[in-house]
Image (cartoon, rainbow, N blue to C red):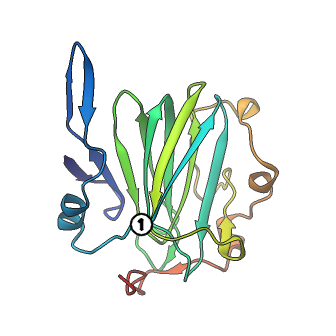
Amino acid sequence: MKFQRTDIEDVIIIEPKVHGDNRGYFVETFREDKLEEFLGYKVNFIQDNESKSSYGVLRGLHYQLPPFAQTKLVRVIKGKVLDIAVDIRKGSPTFGKYVAVELSGNNKKQLFIPRGFAHGFVVLEDDTTFAYKVDNYYSAEQDRGISFEDDMIGIDWKVPYKEIKLSSKDKNQPKLSKTEEIFDFNINYYGDN
């Protein structure tokens, strides 16, 4: 399993080793010990989620406020997405910047997104299955989002605007500059682990 820091060092690309032959393949998709050794802190994933989507579906940019903030470990089982993590930690040198990684059933890459980031993805192939682990349960009261088309962030979603499919919730998310409920770079949001 290979771990690679991105331009925002807290966001990590994980590339599992794929063992394959003419019968198919085997891959370890998660190793708690290896991840925690690389991170230097404990992450307690407590729930797995899965979604299936067609081309152009955009989900995000989502986050939850403390005490229900979530770390995510995301991957694609089948198909392909452009996955995005946006730093929303006020005071961070990378505040408002993002990491974009193509995740697919073929490349088996995963993205580790810590607390303090908004997350979203757009589907690049029909019939895509997206899976992720979280370290905290969903809380409707603490659920927040940022507009996918925020000019300050400037994400190139790689899908023509007219082909993007959004939920009504994601059509009405505020811009980052209008969002007061974000994270503080100087607070350790893993104090409970």
Is residue 109 toward the left or the right of residue 124 in the image? left
**Residue 63 at x, y percent in the picture:** 59, 66
Is residue 152 toward the left or the right of residue 74 in the image? right
**Residue 57 at x, y percent in the picture:** 67, 37
Q: Could you tell me which secondary element the residue under label 1 belongs to? A: loop
> Is residue 91 placed above or below 114 in the rendered structure?
below
Camera-side residue: 76 or 119?
76
> Is residue 146 placed above or below 106 in the rendered structure?
below
**Residue 132 at x, y percent in the picture:** 47, 51
Type of the residue with mark 1: Pro
Q: Quadrant of residue 20?
A: top left
**Residue 41 at x, y percent in the picture:** 26, 75
Name the residue beneath numbered marker 1.
114
Farthest front residue?
23
**Residue at the image point whose x is 62% and y is 60% from the top:** 62
Camera-side residue: 27 or 188?
27
Q: Quadrant of the C terminus?
A: bottom left
**Residue at the image point whose x is 36% and y is 46% from the top:** 110
**Residue at the image point whose x is 43% and y is 37% from the top:** 102
- Estimate how packed mark 1 is, as few (under 14), some (14 to 19) or many (20 or more) residues with alpha carbons within 10 Å: many
**Residue at the image point whose x is 45% and y is 68% from the top:** 135
Is residue 8 toward the left or the right of residue 66 in the image? left
Residue 157 appears anywhere in the view: no
Q: Quadrant of residue 133?
A: bottom left
Total count of labels:
1
Camera-side residue: 8 or 122?
122
Residue 188 appears anywhere in the view: yes
> Is residue 83 placed above or below 125 in the rendered structure?
below
